[in-house]
Image (cartoon, rainbow, N blue to C red):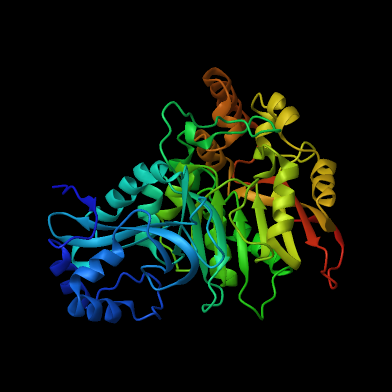
């Protein structure tokens, strides 16, 4: 049964419950490392003068220099609500500068909330956040910034379930290699509609959420062990083995490479993909603890400047709506000396499907030329390090390749008309009558590496590899 909760001003009826929660060890201070002693302070105030305590917390125009969680701030407004299901269940607050919706330096977001632990996992936080979002326009706010620690999965789920859009990532001061995630929550606007499948200034892109690819992607695009090892060895040339890296898997899909990167190189891997269904599928997989999956666009990465050691882009470039914007974002988030590594098909590369399916229109309009990829990254300020044509094995034999193709997990195959797809499958089957079907099936992939200016020890390499 779903219990409805309400946001109410702090009041005498709920005050005993608030005091009991404090006495039991709960605190409205939401930091993973509480340091302000707010729980003890509030207990003392309540026991000394409960009415004065309530008066200090109430009023939509109250100006404070210390937030409810104890943070010292410039003079700003803070509205405090208690979450109630008939009893005190938690607290949520909304902060802003007195004359605007902006936030001063040192304040991580507009919203802070904390539910008492014995009423967690009941949907109370999500209801409270949604209610607060409905009230935001009353205070002149069309959107609210909210932050959470990257390891606080329950809080992330609450924020995302309320419509949170990942907006940024900032280092956590006291925890190296840990980050605070920033999300925007947008207040409802009647008649407002979301965007479509075109990026401003760009081209139409593949919408994976419009197809059922996410559910079958791992079977259709599974890497053979030797193939996975090949790419790991190529990447190892650009990762410092002496320091745990922060790797961005841009266009991670269902996380097939995120897992390989996390296992081989350790550190922290952040997988980003614009497809909700792909990200959901990735999150269902076992996680070794050092992978985070976020939904975001390559053209607006939710990462702080210079935070990443390596950006890995696998079979994604041809899906970018605005390659120039995406390459600039890669340059922004990489540290000096960091690398961006791209594996992608090109118009020049050879792959079996192009010989059996009616793909030429898609190849001509969507696959980049090799020179196009190089020019895009060099224009963004990158230094070219290597380009190789890598021949990888994609199936141990022809029947296995036909079986994988039948799943239609490739974005080009998914967009063919059904009759074109059936004709291509018939051609694959017929080809098996004239070849050694036990031979491995291979394809060419272009491999590019670019360095962000500052890398002094990069050595240029060119050629072919298999």
User: Toward which corner of the image does residue 64 lie, by quadrant?
Assistant: bottom left
> Is residue 438 at least partly visible in the picture?
yes
Task: State the count of labels.
Answer: 0
Q: Is residue 163 above or below residue 224?
A: above
Q: Is residue 447 above or below residue 18?
A: above
Q: Position of residue 60 (x, y in %)?
A: 34, 53
Q: Is residue 390 above or below residue 118?
A: above
User: Which one is nearer the viewer's eye here, 223 or 383?
Assistant: 383
The residue shown at (59%, 27%) is: 430
> Is residue 341 at least partly visible in the picture?
no
Q: Position of residue 173 (x, y in %)?
A: 55, 75
User: Which one is nearer the viewer's eye here, 149 or 428?
Assistant: 149
Q: Position of residue 8 (x, y in %)?
A: 23, 53
The residue shown at (58%, 41%) is: 398
Q: Is residue 304 above or below residue 282?
A: below
The residue shown at (52%, 79%) is: 174
């Amino acid at each position: 049964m779903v219990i409805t909760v309400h946001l109410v001003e702090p009041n005498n009826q709920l005050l005993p419950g608030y005091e009991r929660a404090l006495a039991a060890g709960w605190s409205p201070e939401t930091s993973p490392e509480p340091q302000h002693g707010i729980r003890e302070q509030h207990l003392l105030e309540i026991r000394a003068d409960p009415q004065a305590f309530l008066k200090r917390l109430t009023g939509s125009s109250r100006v404070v220099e210390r937030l409810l969680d104890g943070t010292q701030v410039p003079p700003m407004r803070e509205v405090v609500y208690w979450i109630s299901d008939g009893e005190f269940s938690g607290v949520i607050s909304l902060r802003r500068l007195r004359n605007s919706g902006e936030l001063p330096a040192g304040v991580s977001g507009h919203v802070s909330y904390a539910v008492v632990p014995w009423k967690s996992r009941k949907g109370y936080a999500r209801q409270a956040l949604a209610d607060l979002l409905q009230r935001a326009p009353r205070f002149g706010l069309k959107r609210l910034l909210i932050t959470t620690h990257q390891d606080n999965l329950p809080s992330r789920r609450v924020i995302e379930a309320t419509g949170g859009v990942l907006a940024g990532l900032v280092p956590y001061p006291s925890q190296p290699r840990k980050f605070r995630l920033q999300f925007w929550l947008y207040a409802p606007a009647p008649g407002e509609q979301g965007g479509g499948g075109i990026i401003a200034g760009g081209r139409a892109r593949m919408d994976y959420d419009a197809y059922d690819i996410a559910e079958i992607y791992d079977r259709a695009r599974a890497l053979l062990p030797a193939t996975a090892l090949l790419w790991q060895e190529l990447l190892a040339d650009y990762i410092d083995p002496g320091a745990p890296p922060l790797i961005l898997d841009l266009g991670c899909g269902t996380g097939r490479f995120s897992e390989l990167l996390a296992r081989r190189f350790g550190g922290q891997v952040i997988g980003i993909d614009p497809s909700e269904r792909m990200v959901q599928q990735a999150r269902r997989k076992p996680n070794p603890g050092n992978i985070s999956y976020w939904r975001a666009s390559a053209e607006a990465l939710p990462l702080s400047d210079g935070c990443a050691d390596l950006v890995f882009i696998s079979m994604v470039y041809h899906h970018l709506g605005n390659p120039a914007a995406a390459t600039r974002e890669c340059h922004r988030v990489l540290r000096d000396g960091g690398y961006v590594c791209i594996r992608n098909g090109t118009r020049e590369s050879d792959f079996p499907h192009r010989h059996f399916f009616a793909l030429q229109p898609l190849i001509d309009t969507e696959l980049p030329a090799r020179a196009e990829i190089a020019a895009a990254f060099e224009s963004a300020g990158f230094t070219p390090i290597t380009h190789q044509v890598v021949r990888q094995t994609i199936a141990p034999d022809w029947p296995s390749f036909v079986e994988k193709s039948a799943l239609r997990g490739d974005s080009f195959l998914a967009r063919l008309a059904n009759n074109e797809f059936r004709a291509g499958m018939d051609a694959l089957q017929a080809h098996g009558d004239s070849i050694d079907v036990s031979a491995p099936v291979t394809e060419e992939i272009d491999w590019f590496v670019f360095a962000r200016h500052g890398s002094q020890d990069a050595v240029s390499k060119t050629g072919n590899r298999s």
